[in-house]
Image (cartoon, rainbow, N blue to C red):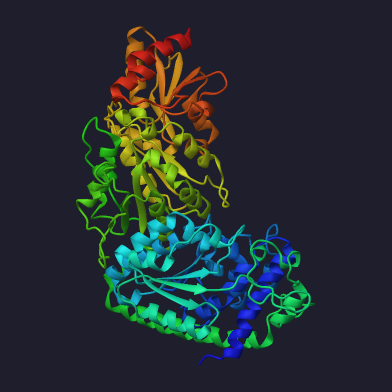
């Protein structure tokens, strides 16, 4: 039974804790947490299913926070659950604290996602909802759980919200319930100064179940959540009209609420009075981080109830496991993030084909072997060749979740952020495909993949200016260099934050896929060609040779009398081979190094790096910016690359004009040696 007095005290306690965090840090956003306190308390105390003893319990409900600047609200709520200590919240935004300014994923403490730039948090929620539906379709209704998201005016305005609204509505993700904290205020203005849209009609047009409520009315919140939980066909948006800085008063004790200035700075620096506001909320000025005694007792009862609910659900799972041993083993494999034992050497690749086609061959091979792959493409399946997988699997459709392929539509960013949510949820391996040039639209998401250390696989095709007639708007030049920067950037675990792989032929493509699927610690970028590539020569098994790509770089050709070492990745390696054949006719021997990933190569022992690179002069060839290979050729080396945008013309013409043919490179090497 609800207790209105206790519920009000709990919400006010969250408000007091939130403003105290911001005030002590002299940094942060107090007004939003004060407005959202009622909803988050009712959600966590009455609706959210979780296990207090194991915050990482797989079948918990999940809460995805979109506006990370409302972190003080989330930390205060999780403090009431015992997930954060008093020291944790009183050191908000400080060096070494567990409470950074924007929440960073920490499942052990109940933080489901790193809140990046606005819009991505609720997108991750949609991805998690799809992962949950996928697992429910595979293993039964006992797995059913709910994904809750919390969004603000800023997230609603960010363009990514259109992609998520459309996709979630189309699929009918009824396990996704989102609260829109609609307080009519954003950081620098009131919302009326930037928008006049009808948000309700917009979401209804996308197929959502939409309700408008007073976001401070606890019974209205309950009624809305009950309705959302009962909805079987549609995702739900609860538009909660709230007041920015709810509970603030001025020095005279008069209400001071709803002002823009309460959004983004400590309330002591506004027209509100910090001490008077603490008193108004029932908190002690001399102990602002205290949990009210009645609220502490209340939450002890809540935690006991949550533990019993989780225990009952675990009994259901144990019975299911006892009755379904084979399915249970499959579920455990899915949850481990591992893939089954697969013989990648058995994949038969056609000779001299585009690496996007070689990738398609691998995907087709994987379709019935890695059952928890969710492959998605942004309206390019027949061009990025993810259709190799699609042809052997089933696509998601409205209320159809026993599937493995998602047509995301033209929504590269939304698709990528959803993939982050799938990876955060667990149990599935997300793969997302688009053209390499459109990785620019995904940058905010793959940066968060790197920051959160999520094993999302980004598949990018049409990797260079050889897109040809499509012209400079579609020809990647600087994109690989951008990815290689993330290979240099360390994540918080001290590892390279992203693995970028640009394979040189079909064999390396197979190896790259194996590396991506077994990389559980970071995102992987797979970069494939549009045009055909000649397979690299081999004295034995090309596949066996290509296994050395797992070290990041290896010698494709080695000669004791070599005068120069040539370095490249992707399709340029075959061009080097063509040039080397011409050079050898002149009696000039060369070494050729294929570098699928410089980052991975730099993680090898120093002795191996010296063995591969050697002491000879080095010349690199890249279809992108020269900086991509400059670290490998060294100060005395040279990189042939592009330092300008491309042009619209057939790929072969561009190769000739830009100098990417065997004869042209042959001339460059001769000049370099001389």
Q: Compare residues 466 and 515 and report the one nearer the observer.
A: 466
Q: Is residue 496 left or right of residue 82?
A: left
| Quarter holding residue 70 | bottom right
Q: Position of residue 46 (x, y in %)?
A: 49, 83
What residue sits 53% from the left and 56% below the top? 116
Q: Is residue 267 above or below residue 358?
A: below
Q: Position of residue 357 (x, y in %)?
A: 25, 38
Residue 548 visible, this angle:
yes
Q: Is residue 230 above or below residue 641?
A: below
Q: Compare residues 300 and 518 and report the one nearer the observer.
A: 300
Q: Position of residue 442 (x, y in %)?
A: 43, 47
What residue sits 36% from the left and 70% below the top? 235
Residue 330 visible, this angle:
no
Q: Is residue 648 left or right of residue 632?
A: left
Q: Is residue 207 left or right of residue 277?
A: left
| Quarter holding residue 663 | top left
Q: Compare residues 273 and 379 and report the one nearer the observer.
A: 273
Q: Is residue 431 above or below residue 609?
A: below
What residue sits 44% from the left and 40% below the top? 500
Q: Compare residues 93 and 560 and report the one nearer the observer.
A: 93
Q: Position of residue 342 (x, y in %)?
A: 29, 50
Count numbered badges in the picture: 0
| Quarter holding residue 340 | bottom left
């Amino acid at each position: 039974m609800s207790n209105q007095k206790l519920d009000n005290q709990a919400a006010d306690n969250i408000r007091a804790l939130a403003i105290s965090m911001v005030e002590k840090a002299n940094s942060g956003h107090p007004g939003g947490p004060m407005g959202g306190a009622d909803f988050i308390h009712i959600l966590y105390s009455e609706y959210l299913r979780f296990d207090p003893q194991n915050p990482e319990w797989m079948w918990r409900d999940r809460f995805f926070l979109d506006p990370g600047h409302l972190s003080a609200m989330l930390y205060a709520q999780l403090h009431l659950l015992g997930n954060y200590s008093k020291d944790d919240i009183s050191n908000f935004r400080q060096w070494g604290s567990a409470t950074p300014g924007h929440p960073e994923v920490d499942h052990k403490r109940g933080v489901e996602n790193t809140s990046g730039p606005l819009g991505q948090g609720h997108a991750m929620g949609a991805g998690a909802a799809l992962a949950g539906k996928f697992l429910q379709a595979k293993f039964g209704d006992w797995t059913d759980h709910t994904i809750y998201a919390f969004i603000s005016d800023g997230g609603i305005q960010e363009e990514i919200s259109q992609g998520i609204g459309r996709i979630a509505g189309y699929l009918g993700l009824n396990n996704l319930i989102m609260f829109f904290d609609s307080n009519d205020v954003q950081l620098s203005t009131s919302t009326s100064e930037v928008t006049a849209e009808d948000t309700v009609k917009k979401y209804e047009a996308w197929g959502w179940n939409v309700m408008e409520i007073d976001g401070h009315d606890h019974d209205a919140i309950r009624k809305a959540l009950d309705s959302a939980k009962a909805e079987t066909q549609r995702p739900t948006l609860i538009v909660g009209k709230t007041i920015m800085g709810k509970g603030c008063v001025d020095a005279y004790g008069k209400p001071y609420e709803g002002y823009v200035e309460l959004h983004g700075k400590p309330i002591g620096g506004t027209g509100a009075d910090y001490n008077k506001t603490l008193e108004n909320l029932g908190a002690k000025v001399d102990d602002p981080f205290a949990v009210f005694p009645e609220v502490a007792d209340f939450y002890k009862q809540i935690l006991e109830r949550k533990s019993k609910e989780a225990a009952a659900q675990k009994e259901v799972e144990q019975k299911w496991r006892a009755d379904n041993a084979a399915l249970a083993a499959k579920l455990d494999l899915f949850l481990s993030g591992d893939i089954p034992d697969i013989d990648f050497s058995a994949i038969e690749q056609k000779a001299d084909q585009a690496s996007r086609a070689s990738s398609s061959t691998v995907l087709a091979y994987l379709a019935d072997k890695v059952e928890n792959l969710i492959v998605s493409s942004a309206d390019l399946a027949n061009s990025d060749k993810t259709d190799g997988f699609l042809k052997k699997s089933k696509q998601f459709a409205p209320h159809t979740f026993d599937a493995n392929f998602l047509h995301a539509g033209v929504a590269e960013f939304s698709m990528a952020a959803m993939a982050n949510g799938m990876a955060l949820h667990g149990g599935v391996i997300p793969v997302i495909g688009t053209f390499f040039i459109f990785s620019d639209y995904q940058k905010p998401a793959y940066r968060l993949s790197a920051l959160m250390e999520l094993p999302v696989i980004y598949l990018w095709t049409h990797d260079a200016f050889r897109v040809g007639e499509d012209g400079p708007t579609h020809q990647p030049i600087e994109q690989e260099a951008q990815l290689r920067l993330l290979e240099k950037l360390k994540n918080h675990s001290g590892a390279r934050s992203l693995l970028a792989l640009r394979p040189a032929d079909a064999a390396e493509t197979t190896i790259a896929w194996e590396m991506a699927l077994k990389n559980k610690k970071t995102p992987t970028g797979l970069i494939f060609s549009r045009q055909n590539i000649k397979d690299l020569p081999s004295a034995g098994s090309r596949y066996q040779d290509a296994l050395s790509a797992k070290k990041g770089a290896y010698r494709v050709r080695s000669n004791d009398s070599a005068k120069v070492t040539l370095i490249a990745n992707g399709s340029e390696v075959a061009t080097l081979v063509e040039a080397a054949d011409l050079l050898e006719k002149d009696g000039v021997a060369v070494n050729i190094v294929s570098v699928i990933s410089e980052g991975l190569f730099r993680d090898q022992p120093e002795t191996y790096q010296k063995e591969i690179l050697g002491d000879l002069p080095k010349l690199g060839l890249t279809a992108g910016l020269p900086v991509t290979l400059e670290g490998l050729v060294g100060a005395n080396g040279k990189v042939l690359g592009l330092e300008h945008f491309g042009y619209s013309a057939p790929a072969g013409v561009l190769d000739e004009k830009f100098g990417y043919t065997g004869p042209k490179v042959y001339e460059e090497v001769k000049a370099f040696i001389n």
